[in-house]
Image: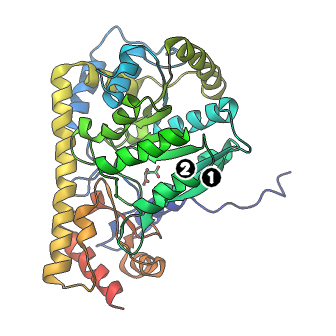
Amino acid sequence: LWQNVPLAPPDSIFQLTAAYKADTFKNKVNLGVGAYRDNDNKPWVLPVVKKATSILLNDEALDHEYLPILGLKDFTSAAAKLIIGSDSPAIKEDRVVSAQTISGTGANHLGALFLSKFYKWNGPAKVYLSNPTWANHHAIFKNVGIEPVDYAYYDPKTIGLDFNGFIEALKNAPDRSVFLLHACAHNPTGIDPTQEQWKAIAEVIGAKKHYSFFDCAYQGFASGDLDKDAWAVRYFVEQGLPLLVCQSFAKNAGLYGERVGALHIVSSDRETANRVGSQVSVLQRSEISNPPSHGARLVSLILNDAGLFEEWKRDIQTMAGRIIDMRKELHRLLTEELRTPGNWDHIVNQIGMFSFTGIQPEQSKALVEKSHIYLTGNGRISMAGLNSHNIRYFAGELDGVVRK
Ligand code: LMR
């Protein structure tokens, strides 16, 4: 049995974490996985999460019963308001269906599965993904029989957005295509459209009747402000464009291993939303039956208590602020101290947890193999892996591979 099962390659991102852990070199640096670290390279349990955890621990009324199939209602309702906006017509008219999911990956999967069953495809099922995108997007859609197709996004010449290419791709795709859009803090490039560019994108999407599949894994990390980072999603909802949103609390609440997320499908009216919800519920039941309770309870406490919510916003600013400081320092080291060849302004212009350095795969490989600096082959670095103790070493090694 299983003689014909081929050996699969390891996951590109989690392989880096494993290799970093196994490395005994004193000055090793992990810039692979998108996970926040404090200035001492330690995972950071948000103070607000510690507070919420102690509230849960002291709650005698809590038990370990099943949650409803679509999850904890207090969590999903508050999560929907957080991304779509509490004043949104879609929320007020009760036409958003929300399901608690196994973090953002689970939301992407459930959303993709729902589309694979119910979207009215013009021909074979396809999803347009930004080139590049988070590698797992490809796998998630392929798993449910939806073929990924690239759309232009990144321009290597400017290390910026290929806005014209993006607009052309939207125009050239058949009407009613599905486009995956990163709501903010694009992974892996750290390059987002401006609000004016989003408006132009929305206009073409509306004219072509495309479906927007938003992935929002970094709300708060792009600008440090939860509302600002939700701008594109809210604008699309206001324009009446058909869409869904995948939401993760892994990064902005530091709840990576708790797998807290949600899928929100915005429908045109309440009656449609009810039918959509009934089918999402059937899919969820067959996949995971009911989502896990602990992380959702934590986030629900934080979202539904004004005091905790304010504290959370401060914690997000602490994380976003440290990342911005690292961007500035890296830029200063490269441009002023080391005078590294090339333009490095993208380091400070890009936003969110990642920076796309623009270096070539062989240069990334050299950093991993010779310098013990772990980063993905596409030159993406997680800014959260840099700190005041290792940034000089990283800048020096980067300068070295660029000069070679
Ligand atoms: C990343 O891109 O590093 C994160 O989203 C972690 C992951 O699941 O890949």
Give whichever of 81, 370 is nearer the camera: 81
- Say whether residue 49 is left or right of residue 205: left
Q: Position of residue 18 (x, y in %)?
A: 47, 61
Q: Residue 32, located in which quarter of the rendered image?
A: bottom left
Q: What residue do we see at 21% from left, 48% from top? A: 319
Kind of residue at badge 1: Pro
Which residue corresponds to mark 2? 137
> Toward the viewer: 255 or 304?
304
Q: Is residue 338 left or right of residue 398?
A: left
* Residue with the most extreme bottom position: 404
Q: Residue 356: x percent and y percent? A: 36, 66
Residue 133 showing in the rendered view: no
Q: Measuring 25% from the left and 74% from the top, which residue is drawn there?
A: 344
Image quadrant where residue 281 sits: top right
Of residues 191 and 269, the one nearer the viewer is 269
Instruction: State the separation of the CA atoms marked 1 and 2.
Output: 8 Å
Q: Is residue 65 left or right of residue 186?
A: right
Q: What residue lies at 40% left-to-right and 59% top-to-bottom? A: 163
Q: Earlier in the sequence, mark 1 or mark 2?
A: 2
Residue placed under numbered mark 1 in the picture: 148
Residues at discs 1 and 2 in contact (Cβ within 8 Å): yes
Q: Is disc 2 placed on a helix, strand or loop?
A: helix
User: How crowded is the residue under tag 2: few (<14 C-alpha within 10 Å), some, or many (20+)?
Assistant: many
